[in-house]
Amino acid sequence: MAADVVFLNGRVVTMDPAQPRASGVAVLGNRILAVGDDETIRAAVGPNTRVIDLGGRTLLPGLNDNHCHPVYYGFNLAKIDASPSATPTLDSLLERFAEAAAKEPAGNWIQGRGYDDTRLDVKRHPTRWDLDRVTPNHPAILTRTCGHMSVVNSVALRMAGITAETPDPPGGRIVRDEHGEPTGLLQEHAQDLVRKLIAPPTVADIKEALVAAGERFLSMGITSVAEASLRTSDELAAYQELRREGRLPVRVYLMMIIDNTLDAMEQLGVRTGFGDEWLRIGPAKLLQDGSGGGRTALMSYPYPDEPDNYGIAVYTQEYLDEAFRRAAAAGFQGAAHAIGDRAIDMILTAFERALEAHPQPDPRWRIEHCGLLRPDLLERMRRLNVIAVPQPSFVYYLGDSYIRNFTKEALALSYPARTWFDMGITAVGSSDTPVVPADPWVNIRSAVTRLTQDGQEMGAGQAVTLDEALQMFTINGAYASFEENIKGSITPGKLADLIVVDRDPYEVEAVDLHTVQNDLTMVDGRIVYER
């Protein structure tokens, strides 16, 4: 049988233990036809076959970013880039806001994303008064890199009716100065007091953002993603319309936020797994705490120099128990954002109670991030077969702030990939972009080296091998969405989602893995990107 596309003369890393290495691959339609040596694969060449000589380059399965925010990522491409690399100083950040305000009519929103107070030259959060200097006639909002807090200016505070007398909302905090005045920093659900004032995007806007994000993913060799927070019918409509139009760039697994979607899904009988190989309903999810870098992750002990700060608990145990009981009863995989050890403890308790009330034969429930653990929590994860969905590149981009915020003892089990592998707990790779960049080779480097931007080692002893890091971003990602039988490895019969990189990562020094470049991306048997 003649193939449509044949790859020859390469180093094929299959991620399939039955045939770990090969030199060629044949593709027919949207499936992998054959894997083997060049002589075997040449037998599949016909008169209309496209033959690609890899010239010794490496062929891998398409990478899977199993926790990210494609909608937000796409929209953020059009916002002010306030990341440390773009605006390392407060003055440069404010200059970007001033430039944007000069182009916008008074009253229009000015939005930025990506600042990190720990890497700004002033080593603090910007304030409303900082933003007021450059946006006196516009409402302005600047979101921290973690997404769990934002700084707004005085115009935005007035529009939201936030004053010194405004109480903290449930699951949120209005940060105040020594006089009780709001500084403009809003944490967790307090952001909603302002965000609800910003006109929501249309379905057409969301589609445009998803295509823009998808093109970036494809250029990096990412062929599958998990959308970590689907909340609205418009977001779901945008995904569905792109799928119907054949314009969905990458395969998507949708995490449905319980507070926004579970009622409707229960009524309709929709559950995890509904959809196809391009777009599939995933877990029912809640967010239980904040971020480690922003000191809002929920801990069982206080943060250094802040004896009253244990982080933020978004929900009570009773609420979590009931929400996940309903999710289990409706046939959903469960998932929860939990970074601090106390948050993870509460989530595991809710998972245990939900699955005891409504057992599932193969639950694969997930803890997203799963940042700071204890031995007892790890044992509970193993017993429940809970999947860990960390972001190794947090170590690189955010690790220096973690080292300031947590003790060495706590960091010894921070995003503990080595321990997960040793205990048989499935660990899955992801980026959480736009929280940090989606570059998968920075992510893989972080998993293998555990080095921060400043060259410190975070969580000594928790590094994994390159094989294990690649598993996290391929076959383990497919397992987390119940799709290991159709993708995640280069195996005959599986979907033809393949990438070509410019060099063999196994011959690259670990500290240089971030220099690996993606040359070609194939999705569903079609080449969709070439460098």
Image (cartoon, rainbow, N blue to C red):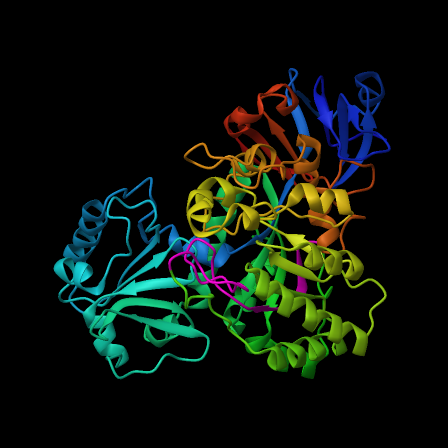
Residue 289 part of the magenta-drawn span: yes
Residue 222's image quarter?
top right
* Residue 144: % across, % down: 36, 56
Residue 130, position in %: x, y? 18, 58
Above or below, 480 relative to 334: above
Q: Indicate yes or no whether the magenta region holds residue 311.
A: no
Q: Is 460 on the left or on the right of 436, as rendered?
A: right
- Tell me what residue is drawn at x 51 percent, y 56 percent: 69
Give the left or right position of residue 188, taking residue 500 as reference: left
Identify the residue shown where x is 55% and y is 60%: 340
- Say left or right for 488 vs 34: left
Q: Give how far across and how far down residue 181 sits, in percent.
A: 22, 74
Left or right of 345 on screen, residue 26: right
Q: Is residue 470 above or below residue 117?
A: above
Across and down, in percent, residue 251 comes to 63, 51
Q: Residue at x 48, y 43 (%)?
A: 216
